[in-house]
Structures are given as C-alpha cells and as structure tokens.
Amino acid sequence: MGIFGFLKNEDEIDDEQLKNGEPYVELSTGLDDYENPSWSQVESAVHDVVDSEDSFATLSFVNYNLEVDTIQCIKDEEYYSFEALPAKDSEEFGKIYHKESLTLEEVVELFKTFYDTQKVIGYKAFIEDHFQE
C-alpha cells in the first residue's frame, strides 16, 4: 500500500458537493483543509511538510473527471515521497503511483504542474502499488 492510501477518505469530502457533482479543489494538510486554494497556499503547504507522522500535503481535484485526481507528499528525513492517486471512477482506481527520494524543488514542481494543468506527467513510470479498502 502507498504511504497515503489511507488519507483518501470520502467521509472528509463535503457530501453536498460530491452528490451534485460540483467540481472543487481541496488542499489538505496535517492541520487544515482549504477549499479552492490559491497557488501560494498550496506552495506554502508543501514547504511546511516536515519529517513527522502527521505532516503531509494533499491536493485533490474533485469531480473534474480526471484520470488522477489527487496527489500527496510527505517528507522522510531530507527527501520527499510523492504519490499520484487515480480517480475513483477511472480504470486505474485502486492503484497508487509513487516516487521516492525527491527534493523539495521537484515536489513543488509536481504540485505546480498538477495545480496548473490537472495532470501528473509521467506518473505511470513511478512505482506502482495498490490501494486496499
């Protein structure tokens, strides 16, 4: 299982938006959740990830009909781990694509690309694991 497979929890998503199929963006950290965050909020959240159990940054594009709708990162000592999670309604759902030993700059770039384009370029070349419900 990937590092953050347990974090993608539908109970935390606003039920009304999910039922209506209304697209929205959500940024989650170990401390707060932000709906429709600005890039500066996302970038700050990634910079604030520290080497501890409860520190992470997750960015989700909910109801956008994307192949990958959630990305996540944590820090392990001096490097970062990054995950791309396919959307629940995609054929890839249940898989977790992750990349290890990334620098802060590499993780920020992955988040920036996803924030701007809603794509994770090259994620199928990452290590593949499976999410278990």
Image: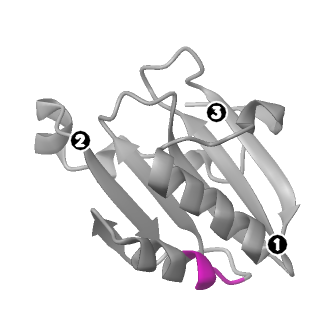
Residue 75 appears in the picture as rendered: yes
- At horizontal 58% and vertical 60% (from top left) the residue drawn is 111
Counting from the top left corner in percent of width and height, residue 123 is at: 72, 37
Read off the magenta span. 46-50
- At horizontal 42% and vertical 71% (from top left) the residue drawn is 39
Q: Residues within 10 Å of mark 1 (few under 14, many from 20)?
A: some
Which of the two discs, 3 and 1, labels the residue nearer the N terminus? Answer: 1
- At horizontal 49% and vertical 19% (from top left) the residue drawn is 90
Identify residue type, mark 3. Answer: Phe
Instruction: Give the side of residue 78 with respect to residue 97, left or right.
Output: right
Q: Secondary structure at mark 1?
A: loop
Q: Quadrant of residue 53?
A: bottom right
Q: Residues within 10 Å of mark 2 (few under 14, many from 20)?
A: few
Residue placed under numbered mark 3 in the picture: 131
Instruction: Give the side of residue 29 with respect to residue 125, left or right.
Output: left
- Asked if the magenta segment contains residue 128, the reply would be no
Cα–Cα gap, marks 2 and 3: 24 Å
Cα–Cα gap, marks 1 and 2: 31 Å
Looking at the rendered image, the disc whose residue lies closer to the viewer, 2 or 3, is 2
Residue placed under numbered mark 1 in the picture: 103
Counting from the top left corner in percent of width and height, residue 93 is at: 55, 24
Q: Are marks 3 and 1 in contact (CB under 8 Å)?
A: no
Residue placed under numbered mark 2 in the picture: 23
Identify residue type, mark 1. Answer: Thr
Q: Nearer the viewer, residue 96 or 132?
A: 96
* Quarter the C terminus occupies: top right
Q: Nearer the viewer, residue 121 or 104?
A: 121
